[in-house]
Amino acid sequence: MGMSIALERDASQAAVKASEEKSLVLSAQAGDRLAFEELVRRYDREVLRLATNLVHRPEDARDIYQEGFLRVYRNLHRFRFECSFYTWLYRIVTNVALDHLRRRNTRREDQAPVSEDAESGTRDFFDRQPEMRAAANPEKALLGRELGVHIRGALRRLSPRERMVFEMKHFQGMRLRAIGDMLGTSEETVKNSLFRATRKLRASLNEMR
Amino acid sequence: MHRGKINRAEQPACSEFEPLLILFAAGELDAAAQSRLSEHLAACGVCRADFEEEKRLLSLFSEIRDEPDAALLASCRASLMDALDREEEGGWWRRGVRALVPSSWLAPRPAWSTALLLMLGFSVGILGPRYLLRSRVATPRTGSISASSPVKPSTDSDTAPLSTLDLHSAEVAGINVFPSGGDTPPQVELQLKAQQPLMVHGTVDNDDVKRVLLDVLRNNQGSDPDVRLYAVDLLRARNNDPEVRMALCHAVHTDHNAAVRLKALEALNGAESQELVRQTLLDALVDDQNPGVRVEAINALRDMAASGQVSPDEHMLAVLRERMRNDPNTYIRLQSAAAIRDLGPSQKF
């Protein structure tokens, strides 16, 4: 009983949210800049998170964010509510990100090994290990850092599409069908990309052992 | 994991479960396949170890996740808003050209880019002088204020007022302000683009001037931000006129340029007490993305509460408390706390 009430409440909240979003999109299509800004604020944190974890450089993530939302703005009049705005937005952003990854893969300087600090300008879990644990266990700290570098390297060796699927599935928590919709491909193709990505990552980590 | 791979090769029956393991870890396995896999895992140590490895792999990857920090998000938003401003200033024709000849097409083709530029330069060189000659014949010479428009001059002292239709069909091309010293309001010269160019001049007390300036603020998407800034500045002198007050509130709510919103808030500061003004200040404090505008909203609220123009009721205090807790800007959180300290007790007693 309680569960069904909760489900009904969730469903009605979702319906209100969807109708709110539709009116925002319609206003933005009619030239209301504030409505567009509101749509940006709804989704931009997730877009930036996706971009940051795909490219690991703040300046590249910023480029993807900006180019993605500008394309959305320029093409908003073409959106016909055939899918959710979220799906449509992600379709555009993932295309921008894939282009970016493909371009980067063809640039020679990106193929050379780069120090993580120099590359990202941010320090992640493994980078933080020396400071946190150096006194207690320097050897473990070093291993932790090496593992972090290795994992980043393994991710970089995936194809742009495999990397995108892995990221969207495991870290953005999306369903494979939704990923397929966003990438303009079938669920089966997305599954295959996920299999390939997982196998490559496993193999890459095995090399380290 | 290494052990698992060797054993899997030796046991081909397990290989059919590998994709299932991956899908299971991804939460994408249907109930039937899940129960088949569970039965197999219960019986097969190799696949069980593989499944543990899969979970460990995901946990390792989740540990190197980068969470974008608030500063990066704020800076991305600011850059995007600037880019959108430029986009809007560019107008429809620039967007059209960009759609027809995208930079991604031109950038890798320097020869084509050069040829296109030469063609454009050539066309401008040939057609430009012809267009200028034609427009010189059509455009009236407006060298001084008194020689304003051959069509409908409007000053403080003479001529019939402009019709609403005239104003709606006209776009303000420029504003010139001539300070007149002392307490006298400045003289304003408004150049309007219509079917035939118009010039309106007078002080802000002139109804035509006021009407054009109000129109600039009401239809803020189409005009130049500098023109809107001038309009706000000039209308400030009449901020107790209900129409002006409403247009200033409209600008705070809807103008996409932060400088215009800021100036409109300043212009409202000191206006007669009115629910609309109070609500506009609170809306700006809660909703405006620009911290400068939110700071100005707090300042105006504090000034107006101190002079008794707005009463610091429970709703206003609730908004200030919310800002004190949640505003991303430290200065605004501090200012909200200071405002609660100043305004709170007078509410209680």
Image: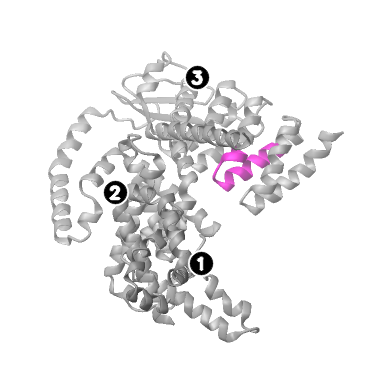
Check the residue under mark 2 and report the chain it is in. A
Quadrant location, the C terminus of chain B: top right
Quadrant location, the N terminus of chain B: bottom left
Q: Nearer the viewer, residue B272 or B333?
A: B333
Q: Nearer the viewer, residue A158 or A90?
A: A158
Left or right, B28 with reference to B112: right
Tell me whether marks 1 and 2 sit on the same chain. Answer: no
Residue B221 in view of the camera: no
Q: Nearer the viewer, residue B290 or B66?
A: B66
The residue tagged with tag 3: helix, strand or loop? Answer: helix
Q: CA distance from mark 3 to mark 1?
A: 70 Å
Q: Nearer the viewer, residue B188 or B145?
A: B188
Left or right, A165 with reference to B99: right
Which residue is located at x 58 percent, y 80 percent? A130
Q: Which residue is mark 2?
A: A184
In percent of width and height, residue A182 lies at 34, 48
Q: CA distance from mark 1 to mark 2?
A: 29 Å
The residue tagged with tag 2: helix, strand or loop? Answer: loop
Amino acid type shown at disc 2: Gly
Q: Nearer the viewer, mark 1 or mark 2?
A: 1
In percent of width and height, residue A1 lies at 62, 34
Amino acid type shown at disc 3: Asp
In percent of width and height, residue B121 lies at 16, 50
Amino acid type shown at disc 1: Ser
**Magenta segment boundaries in residue numbering:** B284-303
* Label 3 with label 1: CB-CB less than 8 Å: no
